Image: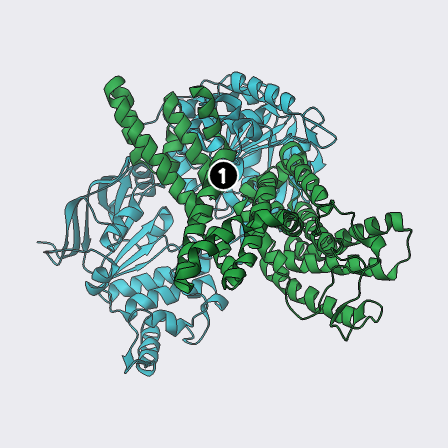
Chain colours: A green, B cyan
Amino acid sequence: MQFDIKKITNSKGFSAFTSAFLAIILGLIFGFIVMLFASPADSLPGFQTLLFGGLSRLGDVIYYATPILMTGLAVGFAFKMGLFNIGASGQYTMGMFFALYVGFMWKLPSSIHWIACILAGLLGGMIWGFIPGFFKALFNVNEVITSIMFNYIGMYLVDMLISNNAKMYISTMARTAYLPQSVQIPSLGIRNSSANISFIFAILIAILLYTILQKTTFGYELKATGYNKDAALYAGMNSKRNIILTMIIGGGLAGLGGAFYILAPSTITGSSMTYEPINVIAAAGFTGIAVALLGNSNPIGIIFSALFISYIQRGGTLTSLHGYKPEIIDVVIAVIIYFSAFAIIMNTAFVRLLKRRKEKKNADSTDEEDNVDESRLIKDQALDREQTEEQPPDDVLTVDSTSENIKEEA
Amino acid sequence: MEDYIIEMLNITKEFPGVVANDNVTLRLRRGEIHALLGENGAGKSTLMSVLFGLYQAEKGEIRKNGQPVQINNPNDATALGIGMVHQHFKLVEIFTVLENIILGVEPTQRGFLQTREAHKKLLELSEKYGLRVNPDAIIEKISVGMQQRVEILKMLFRDSEILIFDEPTAVLTPQEIDELMNIMRNFAKEGKSILFITHKLNEIMSVADRCTVLWKGKCIGTVDIKDTTKEELSRMMVGRDVTFKVEKKEKEPGEVVLSVKNMSAPSAHHKNNAVNNVSFDVRAGEIVCLAGIDGNGQNEFVEALTGLGKTSAGTIELCGKNITKLNIRKRSKIGMSHIPEDRHRYGLVLDYTLEENLVLQRYWEPELQNKGFIRKNKVREYAERLIDQYDVRSGRGPVTLMRSMSGGNQQKAIIARELDKEHKLIVAVQPTRGLDVGAIEYVHKQLVASRDAGNAVLLVSLELDEVMNVSDRILVMYEGEIVGELNPETTTVEELGLYMSGAKRDDLKENKNAV
């Protein structure tokens, strides 16, 4: 039994989970303090709504989790290669536009129309991911700058194209027309919600990405480049091709997110989701960054972090019942992300504390040589320690490995 | 009593695990040019950093004009009239010459910069010492030689009377070097005192009055240049004891494996070529060592050879195929193995496990992957075989995180990977850097074993012992050119030192016929 616990606590996933968990707790505490300041009387019931409000809207939680799960994957996957895909918003918007375009302008049999729309969304995102990737690979233009610019270019372009298209746009309502039933993605059947089977697609895609990263030569190259691009170059990996490919995949994922969002079935028959060309950058892209960070860029972790953020957003929206502005939840989420970086440090401190305690215990039981060895370990910097110490005693090794995991995340 | 302007008495400076300066005494006379000579890591720069206030010595005393002084930081040093030109210039690239010179001592009036006076002073100084510069030129747009002038003017502007030059000639062209030598002589005539760090013997012989030699942190002695020879200095510089000889059988070199013809390569630091028109062959069954002092173009040469960098002229042939323009993977497939100098930067992915690192050069081979999926069990088998065969020790076997392994075993992992892969040529760059004696011996044995198996080995090394003991043939690189080809059996460390410091050079074609 003891052995099993050790095995679990030493795994990479566990330490990622604990640091995310710690960040969430701290973010919530901070959120509560903000609510306390904003309106002390309503803070307790308000906080309760924040925490548990999502339970009453599980369908919505799933529906809103889908696009941010996709943008989270878009950011996280690129991040594994050391690329910061801040352009998920633009790719998401492009995906949405492509899906809308095929939905309105193409005549297709109703059985495959919605599938064609999804694929169009994928293509739109891929194009918008390809461009920054291409410039990065061939001219070493920083992908952060290009993809931020392409957020704006994409958004204004889509707004322009939509508002100039009489078939798609209803100018009196300042929104797109209702999409036909045939292009709406089949519902999951949860009452009063737009939750649809695209959530299942998103989870399958996450698992697929996990497999690519863990099992394929492409994933091996991708992670090697992310960890150490000089070593990847030395090993003869084609980093130019990999950068472009990664950005195309990332863009495609975000584009799918846009398609999944806009093609969702409406709760009111005869209507649909609509897009409003009001010159605002899609928030889903930036939420995706938060999702990816909280999920430690791990596709499986991202599934859970997307669900969590969607859940807490639903609760946050409901706090308006107690007179709170829905923005408060954005503050809470921001704090959670902020603390997820801190949590890594705190986790390290925690591990160190644990180690020190263990050492004290060992002082009574083990021989002196061992102790000298370990106290030296503590003194040295983590890096030096790991490099100089060849075969540390068993119990030190286990603690060591967790601290390594944490470093890796940092 | 002699007139010493600066005395550094019994200086000891320790870093964790190393004594960089061990009881070193250096006395600088007023108005002399005093050279500080030593190999890499001999402690020259550390000693000068102590004088300039960048480090504090554990033991010892610094005196100026006979009075003990305390130098806690570069500002103290500047106040005492000590100025330093660093090997890597400390200039703000986007500032003008004048702005760089007044940086830190900006003349201001009510918070506004007053540059007119400074401008005048700068022009006077540059006139006086023949250091022509344009005060309004932007640093990044002027040549390296000009940048150095700016550094020198910076010292003069602060009225320094003790000038430290840290390897000032490393980045200069021969003409610029001559000019610098003249400038230094002028300074000495003016009564300024100069400390000059270098490992180039010619420069010392031509310009210095006296020379202090450091070896592994210890002061070997101070000599008058007029009473010494290059040979003596060279012997003092490389040290006296020669370590153990590597066991090696006689072996006749076979066919040519690597053939470099008229190859030049650009430098990352300046506009001139770092490697100039280099030609040589390496044959099967021989270890050829490319020797030289650090920064003479070896890095650029290796990068161009392995495909990490580019050539600017010439061709490289490996096993009869022209690989000059091929990418790294193709070179690797033709038969190049590369043990890189910086194992953490290039050789390893530290956040990968041992087994993942062991397949870094061959994860794409059909044996280890199937339709793009890595065959984990095959990788494990392969890793276990290498770990066993090359005795790579780690905490948890194949799944040990590379970062947690010791330096020696990290290097063993690289060597296992590069030697086990199909290869005809091994390019081993400083393969024993930072390793202890046991690991060094292991690496040397592996290289010799690979040579005995009929492979060609190109060893690039800065360690004279390694050069002398391991190689079958020595090529000396100096300022990007091959200046000598030596036989380790017949040559001496002193002679090698002369070639390495540029004091001696052969017309290589002639030499080639002789060997």
The residue furthest left is B1
Q: Is residue A86 visible?
A: yes
Above or below, B182 relative to A116:
below
> With A337 as the anchor, is B434 left or right in this view?
left
Tell me the residue at 39%/57% (across/down): A33
- Depth check: give the residue in front, A127 or B136: A127
- x, y percent for residue B59: 16, 43
Q: Label 1's element?
A: helix
In the rendered image, which quarter is residue B111 located in? Answer: bottom left
- Depth check: give the residue in front, A99 or B55: A99
- x, y percent for residue A401: 44, 30
Label 1 environment density (alpha carbons within 10 Å; few <14, some 14–19, many ≥20): many
Q: Is residue B304 visible?
A: no
Above or below, B452 relative to B432:
above
Above or below, A236 relative to A7:
below
Tell me the residue at 20%/54% (across/down): B28
Residue picked out by circle 1? A16
In the rendered image, which quarter is residue A280 located in? Answer: bottom right
- Depth check: give the residue in front, B497 or B137: B137
- x, y percent for residue B260: 62, 39
- Depth check: give the residue in front, B108 or A194: A194
- x, y percent for residue B330: 69, 37
> With A180 as the anchor, is A81 left or right in this view?
left
Tell me the residue at 30%/69% (across/down): B104
Which kind of residue does numbered mark 1 sit on?
Ala
Quadrant position of the N terminus of chain A in the picture: top left
Count of all numbered marks drawn on residues in the image: 1
> With A360 as the anchor, is A344 left or right in this view?
right
Tell me the residue at 37%/56% (across/down): B168
